[in-house]
Image (tube, rainbow, N blue to C red):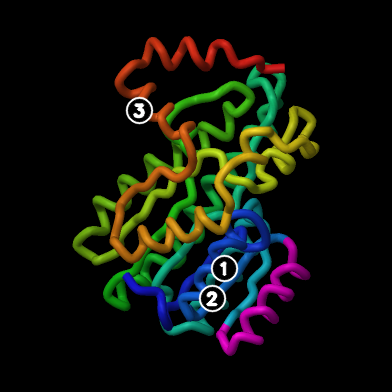
């Protein structure tokens, strides 16, 4: 799918991979819808797009707010005659032991990373079907393929995304609605700084792997290329993506590696 003049809705558009996708879609001359929590940043991005002569609508909301999501979806569908591509990027990571994280934190992460994306998808799918097709781009993670210390709820939420959207892909094939699962490894974003600790506050530390990781702009370029080529799933990052294959083909080695990670 080419993105020129296509309507592309990006959640979590104010930073990291989401902001990089916004810029990449601007380069592709897409019609943009951007969402996130930071309304001021969204408006700055909107101004940036409009100075380039591009259409860009802003819909701020919290992924943990079902009513806010529903209202935004209704307004998007009212303003736009179609949604060609929906990019699910909004989410939050975790840096807390499973035994120390309260269940409320687990629920918050699941609401943000999983149920928010599902709610938006269910609201938008009927329009995609009616218009003859569309594409769902889901920014998951390599930990959607395996568990890792300090990320129990985060890994669970990404596993849930994988299961839901893999199933949905099979259900929607006759409706011409396709799914691209994106599984990033270590990308140079603030995901670790913004990760939630056991008391719900930000970790506020950038993991070395993320500091030295692939740039978000390069990640977005790879995603756009995968959209063009109608890929179903991609892994994006450095050598850390090999862990997916080690887990699958040499599970004993995988468990030895992760058991040596210092969880403190």
Q: Residue at x 34, y 69 (%)?
A: 134
Measured from the top left, where is residue 205 in percent x and y?
A: 77, 35
Q: Seen from this angle, which residue lies furthest bottom?
A: 53
- Image quadrant containing the N terminus: bottom left
Is residue 147 in the magenta section? Answer: no
Number of other residues with Cα within 10 Å of mark 1, as a class: few under 14, some 14 to 19, many 20 or more: many
Number of other residues with Cα within 10 Å of mark 2, as a class: few under 14, some 14 to 19, many 20 or more: many
Query: Mark 2 falls on what kind of element?
Result: helix
Whichever of callouts 3 and 2 sits on the residue coming sooner in the sequence is 2
Measured from the top left, where is residue 118 in percent x and y?
A: 47, 53
Measured from the top left, where is residue 211 in percent x and y?
A: 67, 40
Magenta segment, principal secondary structure?
helix
Q: Residue at x 40, y 60 (%)?
A: 136
Residue corresponding to mark 3: 245
Q: Seen from this angle, which residue lies furthest left?
A: 174
- Image quadrant containing the C terminus: top right
Left or right, 46 with reference to 248: right
Residue corresponding to mark 1: 22
């Amino acid at each position: 799918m080419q993105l020129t003049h296509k309507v592309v809705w990006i959640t979590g558009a104010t930073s990291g991979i989401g902001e990089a996708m916004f810029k990449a879609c601007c380069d592709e001359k897409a019609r943009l819808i951007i969402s996130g929590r930071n309304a001021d940043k969204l408006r700055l991005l909107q101004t940036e797009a409009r100075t380039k002569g591009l259409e860009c609508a802003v819909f701020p909301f919290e992924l943990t707010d079902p009513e806010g999501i529903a209202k935004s979806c209704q307004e998007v569908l009212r303003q736009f005659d179609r949604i060609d591509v929906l990019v699910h990027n909004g989410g939050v990571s975790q840096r807390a032991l499973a035994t120390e994280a309260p269940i409320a934190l687990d629920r918050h992460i699941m609401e943000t990373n999983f149920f928010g994306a599902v709610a938006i998808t269910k609201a938008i799918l009927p329009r995609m079907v009616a218009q003859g097709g569309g594409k769902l781009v889901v920014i998951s993670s390599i930990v959607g393929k395996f568990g890792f210390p300090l990320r129990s709820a985060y890994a669970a939420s990404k596993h849930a995304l994988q299961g839901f959207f893999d199933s949905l892909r099979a259900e929607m094939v006759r409706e011409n609605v396709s799914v691209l699962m994106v599984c990033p490894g270590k990308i140079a974003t603030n995901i670790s700084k913004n990760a939630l600790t056991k008391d719900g506050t930000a970790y506020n530390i950038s993991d070395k792997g993320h500091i030295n990781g692939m740039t978000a702009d390069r990640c977005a370029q790879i995603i756009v290329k995968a959209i063009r080529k109608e890929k179903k799933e991609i892994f994006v990052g450095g050598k850390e993506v090999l862990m997916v294959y080690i887990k699958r083909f040499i599970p004993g080695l995988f468990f030895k590696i992760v058991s040596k990670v210092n969880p403190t």
